[in-house]
Image (cartoon, helix red, strand yellow):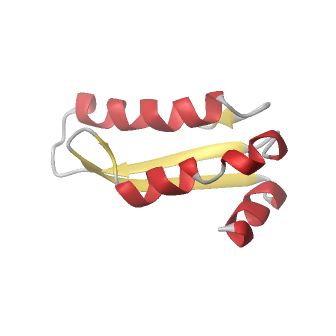
Amino acid sequence: MAEILEKMIAADVIVMATSVYFYTMDAQIKTLIDRTVPGYEEITGKEFYFIVTAADSSKQSMERTLDGFRGFTFCLNDATEIC
């Protein structure tokens, strides 16, 4: 995980992607987010792109997952979501 965190700190742009399961992100991406806690203060000034996929085509099922990603970026300094 330390190697991934170092790459996130060094990156200009971060793309996060997940399948939607029961209106939220999958466990693997949530674990990645949780394990960035030691480097929160170093992940600064990043542009974020989010990709979500689901069998359900309703916008509501995607929005809850995007809210989870936005909760993560809210904790970071100067993070920007690119639509």
Q: From what the image shows, is residue 40 above or below residue 58? A: below
Residue nearest the observer in this picture, 45 or 71? 71
Name the residue located 37 percent from the left edge and 38 percent from the top edge. Answer: 65
* Quarter holding residue 66: top left
**Position in image of residue 70 (x %, y %):** 53, 31
- Numbered label tally: 0
Q: Position of 35 compared to 26: left or right?
A: right
Name the residue located 72 percent from the left edge and 34 percent from the top edge. Answer: 76
Name the residue located 59 percent from the left edge and 55 percent from the top edge. Answer: 15
- The quarter in which the N terminus is drawn is bottom right
- The quarter in which the C terminus is drawn is top right
Q: From what the image shows, is residue 38 above or below residue 44? A: below
Q: Position of 41 compared to 61: left or right?
A: right
**Position in image of residue 55 (x %, y %):** 16, 51
**Position in image of residue 47 (x %, y %):** 71, 43
Residue nearest the observer in this picture, 48 or 23? 23
* The furthest residue to the bottom: 3
